[in-house]
Image (tube, rainbow, N blue to C red):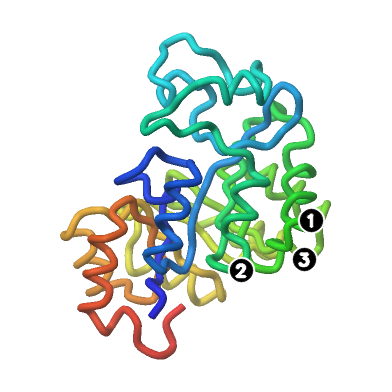
C-alpha cells in the first residue's frame, strides 16, 4: 500500500534535505509524493535547495547565495553525510515512475529569470510532467507556469488561510492548496474540497497533529518530515486510506 502523504524535502527528518539520499528514502518507504525545492545557479542550472543561501545547508556562514554561485561552486560544498547539492535533472530521473514529484519553485519576484521555463523543460525531457504537481509560494510564478504550459499540474502553497484565492485557482487550473495545519479549519477545508481542490496541510509531524488529521481531515494530503512516524500512523488508521480518499 502506498503511504498517502508528501515527504517534505525528501526524508528530511533523517537525511540532509533535498538530497538524492533523502528523495530515495521517500521512494523506499513507499510514499505517494515527494516534495523538493528548486532554484537556479548563476550558470542557469536548476538545483535542489530550500534557502536562498547555502550557508545553513553547507554549515558555512557567508558561503553565498544560490543565485551567485555556479553549479560547480555549489557542488564543491560537502553537505552532511558527504552529500552534494543535487541537480533537478538528477532528482527527476530518480523519482520518475516511482513517486509523484511535488516540485516547489522557489521563485521570489524576478530573482530567477527563466526558472519556470527551465523547470518545465526538465519535467518534460525526463518524462515526469505526467506525474507531478508544481507548486510555489510565489503565485505570479504559478501564473507564468500556466501561460507556458496548458497541461502541467499546478498547486498553490501559502503561509496563511486565503478564502479569496479560489477565482485565481480556477483561472490557473490549480488542483491543490497547501495550508499550514494550524490555520486549517473544517470550514476552510470544505471551501477547498467543495471546489474540487486537494487540501494540503503542512507540516504534520507530531502525533497530536496526526490525530487531528485522522479525526477531522482524513481526505487531505499531508506534508511531513517524520516519514516513518506517519507511515506507522497511516497504516494503523483505516479511515485515512478508505476508498474515496484523495
Alpha-carbon span between mark 2 and mark 1: 14 Å
Q: Position of residue 121 (x, y in %)?
A: 79, 50
Front tag of 3 and 1: 1
- Viewer-proximal residue among 98 and 62: 98
Residue drawn at the location 25% of the way across and 73% of the way down? 214
Classify mark 2: residues with Cα within 10 Å, few (<14), some (14-19) or many (20+): few
Residue drawn where x is 45% and y is 66% of the image: 199
Question: Is disc 2 in contact with disc 1, using a CB cutoff of under 8 Å?
Answer: no
Local SS, label 1: helix
**Which residue lies most toward the bottom here?**
243
Q: Quadrant of residue 235?
A: bottom left
* Direction left: furthest residue: 208
Local SS, label 2: loop
* Residue 234 numbered tag: none
In depth, the one of 43 and 246 nearer the eye is 43
Quadrant location, the N terminus: bottom left
Mark closest to the chain's N terminus, 3 or 1? 1
Question: Is residue 234 shown left or right of residue 117?
Answer: left
Of residues 196 and 35, which is closer to you in this image?
35
State whether residue 241 is above or below residue 37. Answer: below
Residue with the mark numbered 1: 125
Place of residue 208 in the rendered image (x, y in percent of width and height, measured from the top left)? 16, 59
Give the label on residue 97, or none: 2
Q: Nearer the viewer, mark 3 or mark 2?
A: 2
Task: Report the side of 224 relative to 128 (left or right).
Answer: left
Q: In the figure, residue 216 lies in which quadrant?
A: bottom left
At label 3, counting other C-alpha atoms closer than 10 Å, the crowd grade (few under 14, some 14-19, many 20 or more) is few
Label 1: how many Cα within 10 Å (few below 14, some 14–19, many 20+): few
Specify the label residue 151 is tagged with.
3
Question: Residue 94 sits in which quadrant?
Answer: bottom right
Quick one: label 3 or label 2, which is nearer the N terminus? 2
Residue 120 pos. (x, y %): 76, 51
Amino acid at each position: 500500500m502506498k503511504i498517502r502523504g508528501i515527504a517534505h524535502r525528501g526524508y528530511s527528518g533523517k537525511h540532509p534535505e533535498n538530497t538524492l539520499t533523502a528523495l530515495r528514502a521517500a521512494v523506499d518507504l513507499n510514499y505517494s509524493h515527494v516534495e523538493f525545492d528548486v532554484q537556479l545557479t548563476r550558470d542557469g542550472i536548476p538545483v535542489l535547495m530550500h534557502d536562498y543561501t547555502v550557508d545553513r545547508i553547507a554549515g558555512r556562514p557567508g558561503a553565498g547565495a544560490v543565485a551567485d554561485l555556479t553549479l560547480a561552486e555549489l557542488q564543491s560544498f560537502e553537505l552532511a553525510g558527504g552529500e552534494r547539492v543535487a541537480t533537478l535533472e538528477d532528482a527527476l530521473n530518480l523519482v520518475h515512475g516511482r513517486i509523484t514529484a511535488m516540485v516547489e519553485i522557489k521563485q521570489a519576484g524576478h530573482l530567477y529569470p527563466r526558472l519556470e521555463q527551465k523547470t518545465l523543460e526538465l519535467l518534460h525531457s525526463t518524462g515526469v510532467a505526467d506525474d507531478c504537481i508544481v507548486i510555489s509560494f510565489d503565485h505570479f510564478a504559478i501564473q507564468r507556469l500556466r501561460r507556458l504550459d496548458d497541461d502541467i499540474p499546478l498547486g498553490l502553497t501559502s503561509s496563511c488561510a486565503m478564502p479569496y484565492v479560489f477565482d485565481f485557482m480556477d483561472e490557473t487550473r490549480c488542483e491543490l492548496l497547501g495550508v499550514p495545519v494550524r490555520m486549517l479549519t473544517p470550514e476552510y477545508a470544505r471551501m477547498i474540497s467543495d471546489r474540487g481542490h486537494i487540501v494540503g496541510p503542512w507540516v504534520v509531524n507530531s502525533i497530536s497533529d496526526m490525530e487531528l488529521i485522522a479525526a477531522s481531515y482524513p481526505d487531505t494530503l499531508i506534508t511531513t518530515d517524520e516519514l516513518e512516524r506517519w507511515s506507522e500512523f497511516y497504516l494503523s488508521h483505516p479511515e485515512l486510506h478508505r476508498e474515496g480518499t484523495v
